[in-house]
Image (tube, rainbow, N blue to C red):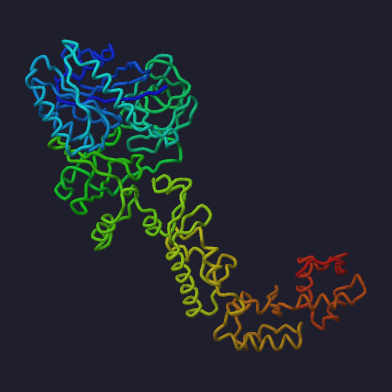
Amino acid sequence: MTTHVVATAGHVDHGKSTLIRALTGMEPDRWEQERVRGLTMDLGFAWTTLSSGREVSFVDVPGHERFIGNAIVGLATAPIVCFVVAADEGWSTQSGEHRDAIAALGIRHGLIVVTKTDRAPDLVAATMARARSEFALTGLRDAPIVAVSVAQGKGLDDLRLTLEQVLTATPDPDRSARLRLWIDRGFSISGAGTVVTGTLASSTLTKGDSLLLTRHGGTPRAVSIRGLESREKAAGVLYPVNRAAINLRGITATEARRGQALIAPDTWHMAAAMDVRRICGVALDAAPAQVIAHIGTAAVPARLRSLGSDHARITLAWPLPLTVGDRLLLRDPGRHLVIGGVNVLDPAPPALLRRGDSRRRTQALAAMPLAGDVQAKVAERGAVAADELQRLGLTDANAVPPPEVHVRGPWWVHQPTYDAWVRQLRALVEEDERRNPLTRGVSEGAVQSVLAPCAAPFIAQLVKDGGLELHEGHIRQPHARLHLGRAEAAVGTLEARLTAQPFNAPLADELTALALGTRELAAAERAQRVLRFPGGVVLLPSAPRQALQRLTQLPQPFTTSQARQALGTSRRVAIPLLEYLDRKGLTRRVDDDHREVRRETPAQ
């Protein structure tokens, strides 16, 4: 069954509510005070089924200037507008403000109804012409116009027919879109609990869904759908476009109110600041610094920093779920006037901290398409998670990376930036080695503090692509290329001695004479030039293999004394070397003084 939601608009007392009563047979005004005064102050709701079977819900908005905020709430979530102008009063003050709101919100589908034609039949044509001219620069420039008199019952059939035509021409909503339902009411029902209502403009709602409820100044709260209704009928699933009453579990009525939104988990970026482009209205460099930003049912105090006449940075008082392409209405809180409409170009913009950042950002925004620039966003950061790009509205699950952007696992990476990281890492390691040849290398922590934060997931790959190696948390040149600086000659002398006599480990004073202290020997070991054992014993890395070859020739098992004699060395060297072979699983202790070479020894 096809469903639609239509919002009214127009000056106070021009007959919006009367028109809805005539079309639906329902009273849209919800409050007794509204009915007594004959003045709509808040949103009203009614519905009907047209002769075609289409179900239409109406959101009736107040026309008085004091309630323009409420009017915007009703208009901002309805894809179709029914604009009302009374023939006897003609185009009036709030007619212009509601027109400005419609233009700022980017509403492109609707119809214009000239009411009260019985009071001024000779002014109907002029009123129609004026309305047509007033909407000439808006999305309703080609909207059909119908004249009616509810008092006389004239024109209502034409109105219904025209409404059918408008609904037929309106594009079908996207049922698979990300869920974002802006709440226009929150209340409690005895026995049911918390209920919120809103217009489901896209996506799908299903009983049992787990969602998030955004909150003013707080992180979104997990909730679930306990029950669904539309037009006072229970439903298991609701499709767009539809009015929805949602019974929520996990939240109290005082925590759910107008301006919040129900969103699907992990699908939206909560934006505290955004860069925007003017679509209509006042030049942004002439707009006030303090504005009210309207989107959906939310009206949030915001700070506007102009970046020229057509672009600005808007910082919200609290975050909202926003995406590239969202339309915001800006209003002057001092004069209560609509400033204009802007499109979100970037809901996660870079900070403007350095001299010249504003000028460069203005230039970048001027070149940015309305759909955003995924390559610019990835280049700006160096790397962005694929799911974050989807949350920002820059890509979808089937998106193909643009030139210079490569996919690395869950990340989209700007290749020129990645190549710069490789060069930066190599330079960092080379500079560290130049300053201190005996260094263990540059720690991963130090690398992460120098490179951009988003480079952290790629450290291992950057090391590989840079021809470096990662060893025990430090990044260094491959050991075959390491040079030990001033200790190089002494280590060479030590290597020559141990090559000739593999188990004749130098004593401490001999090492001191070579100027090989703990630091120099540690560096030589990191370079795999020597192997250190407990007790200050230093041998070549080949010593365990050579020892095993000699020990294999002994009768098995063998004693420590037999091993020492076979190796031609002292107990000082033999014992730590044998214990090393035990740890490596190359030999096995039989008793306190006997060992044997394992028949199947692990590879060294």
Residue name at image x 47 percent, y 26 percent: 206
Q: How many marks?
A: 0
Rendered location of residue 509, percent (x, y)? 65, 86
- Answer with left or right where residue 424 lies relative to residue 555: left
Looking at the rendering, in which quadrant would you find the C terminus? bottom right
Snapshot quadrant of residue 405 = bottom left
Q: Is residue 327 above or below residue 163?
A: below
Rendered location of residue 514, percent (x, y)? 62, 88
Rendered location of residue 110, percent (x, y)? 25, 29
Looking at the rendering, in which quadrant would you find the N terminus? top left
Residue name at image x 48 percent, y 31 percent: 210
Residue name at image x 13 percent, y 34 percent: 133
Rendered location of residue 300, percent (x, y)? 26, 37
- Answer with left or right where residue 142 lies relative to residue 576: left
Most extreme residue toward the right, as rendered?
555
Q: Nearer the viewer, residue 450 or 22?
A: 22
